[in-house]
Amino acid sequence: MKIQYASYQDTIDFLQKSMSEHPHLIRLQSIGETWEGRPIMLVTVSLDVTYADDKPALLYTGSIHAREWIGNELAIKFIQYVIDNYRFNPKLQTALTRNTLYMVPCLNPDGFEYSRNHFSFWRKNRRNNGDGTFGVDLNRNFDAKFMRNQNTQSNTYGGPHAFSEPETSAIRDFVESHENIRIALDYHSQGNVFFPAHKFNHEVEIEGTDLNVLCANMNNEIKKVTGRQYGIHRGKPPAQLIQGSGREYYYRRGIIATVVEVGTRNIPDYMKNMAQSVAENIPAVAYALSEAINYSPLAPSRVAEFTIKNVGRDTVELEWRYQERDDIYFEVYRSEHNKSPCTEENLVAITKSQSFLDTQLKSGHFYFYNIRAVDKVTKIKSPFSPELRLKTMLADNECGRTLFPAREQVGYLSQHYLNKNKEHFGYNSMFIGVDKKRGISIGVVAFDLSTIPDGSHVATAQLFLYPMNRVAAKIEKYGEWSISILDGNLVDDIYDFATIHEAKPLHTLGQTIESDKMTQGIWLRWSFNGVERSLLESLLTQQTLLLRIQGPQSLPLGNDSQVMQFDIGYGTFGGGLHYRPNLELIYQLPERSDTVLASSCNTIYKDKVVADKLASGFDANGEIVYGQLAFELNECLAPDRTVFTQACLTLYNTNSLASAKDVRFTVELVELKDVDFKHVKQRQKIEYIGYEVSNEQLKERTAHNFIFDSYSLKELARLHKAQTPLYFIIRATAESQARDALVHWQDCNDVQPAKLHVEYIERRVEALPAPIHLQTQVDNGVVKLTWLNPDNADLVGSFVVRNRFHPPRSPFDGVKLYGGPDQYTFDNFGNADIEKYYAVFSYDHVPNYSQPAVVHYPGRGKVQS
């Protein structure tokens, strides 16, 4: 076997030597004895270790499964890292001064040595089961949903009863006598993924964000070292969670707990792979140690009622509640991806206020917000509030779609399963890559684009895929996964491997995902660039986007698999709608245009108004002379369905000024009560239109375009909705008093009269009314929701969302339960006993979402409010 790995006795010898050389830092003890008489060693590390049990602590357990040697190896290397660095590394000093590390390098000494010396694939401990078999899976032997299993030969045999084994009872007794343990890391192999703990129901827990952020921030430390990205996957309870695990036992006791699965093999090449895994996880463990105090009684309380006050197109206002304290401030984090770290890079606010306005956001985009309180003296931080997820509103000229493939349009094709490939569509998951069994496997996803009008401009396009398992991707840093756009007109049969495999792509999306970035449990996102969006626009006439997903197509000598598994959201073991591949589009409908001539024009002097003539400047006495124009937009442009995208006022001058004086002309959009000098003087200016025109420009050309800015377009829409004429004033300005400086413009009766050109799209402007009469009842143990949709021809459907902690104020502020035209749905995966909030939003084709109809569900058997 690989001699670089330490034996269990090597580990004990190292720990004893470390303690003897650093007695103020390290304490070593046995917490129990195995079936074969080996001590179960636990090392305590802290500054000063005498007071270790008085500090918040991180519990590290390794190699509970015998063949997973990473846990023991990482523990040794981490202790050595501490010894080498604690004297001068300020972050490590602070972590060790404030916190304690309890580390069990190997929780399964008997099995570990059996794996090392007899059978490397051994997993269990070495209990004599009395029937010719040996061993209990220690990670099925805790009392968290312990499941009795009579098959003693099974690799996952959990033992005769919970805590039947000396190893698990030893760690139980230690944990239950050390209430200072706040975080638990259980190191396993393989998969390069974090598995945070769960409470065996489909409801979000108050600590859910704490678990994800801890893993994401550890992930961030890993990425700094090797660039590798671990997955974060909490599983889909209750059916797909292991039972009797230490992770859930720790979590049940209020400890933030996660399994860390490292590497792609249990016992990899030490110098090439294990050394990397150890190096990248040392700073991750150090980070987790520093966080223990933030989950202790010393930490500020969690921020309450963190919620959305308002969502705009490019702004979001958040609010929360906290007891007024001078020694507390708040850190607010924002990211654009789920399960992102909360670090200095995405810290968007440090504030003492209990609200925050975030600006300069992108319209129609998802954002994720997190918050924690901080003690300004000690710098100890609170646990996180539940994460807020939202989507900014679409801009006035935008429409959005989230497209999902139909069941028969998503699946995978394998080289060695030609007769069964059609069965791989709409069934559980896609296997993409290459292995000995399937040969080359490629994914196929087709999206129906028929709801996007031909001629639309695609502003953003993002494809999302959910990787659910990477254990079969066994080779570190080998191969890439990519996505190609195929010409659907040239593909007669999407179920034929050769046809799809040999199809020449129209384009391959610019982003490829390398194997060590191919995570489990974190959505992958491909963002289309400008070239790719233009291609997508050209495919609107075909009404189909056909994608091929490919991975590596050959294997290095001696390897048997490099395959990633992606959820498709269909089938018995598919994750449902939440995990289905989807295409997020923001697009603008084809523009229309209209040109309107002025309905009236006037020249307004101090003492008179000259109708049907248009001039502006200064008269012989130096008094200002105004030009005034009025336009009335086409009545066919329905205000509730017209969004102006561009507007331009064009004026034509017939003369210029002979004077060398610098005279300039501006155009104002105004509110005007009457057309006379007095009311023009007292006009309410709305906005300047375009830029001023100089006399030099009047000499150079006769046509002048005044382009509306964003604010002017909004005011144009407001005035159009009010059916008010658009009034413009042409005003002259000069560096000093000017006389006889009058410019004449083409008037309403001339060959080239002033004109207003507008570009617009036709889409609904305002949201629909909210649904009404939202009610809940328990039907066969499941919460059923009923409501009444608004009676409106523009209604597409209603969007139902669940949130355990506060009333949802955005359709994306919680777990989506349903979207469609029905007026009822079931919360099939919720727990009917748990209090929560439900909200229903109506939506149209844009979609605009209504204000929510909200109901508080108190839990089964309690009074609804």
Image (tube, grey):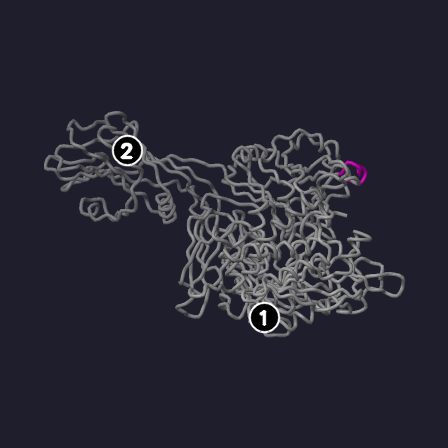
Q: Amino acid at mark 1?
A: Asp
- Asked if one can make out residue 291 in the rendered structure from this viewpoint, the answer is yes
Circle 2 SS class: loop
Give the quadrant of residue 512.
Answer: top right
**Boundaries of the magenta span:** 414-421
Identify residue for label 2. Answer: 748
- Up/down of 13 relative to 652, above or below: below
In front of the other: 281 or 232:
281
Drawn side of residue 124 relative to residue 852, left or right: right
Q: Residue furthest top?
A: 700
Q: Provide residue 283's location: percent of width, then percent of height.
A: 57, 53
Q: Provide residue 792's location: percent of width, then percent of height.
A: 53, 53
- Up/down of 10 relative to 476, above or below: below
**Is 420 contained in the magenta span?**
yes
Drawn side of residue 141 relative to residue 88, left or right: right
The numbered mark at residue 760 is none
Drawn side of residue 505 relative to residue 704, left or right: right
First in residue order: circle 1 vs circle 2: 1
Q: Residue at x 79, y 55 (%)?
A: 122
Identify residue for label 1. Answer: 53
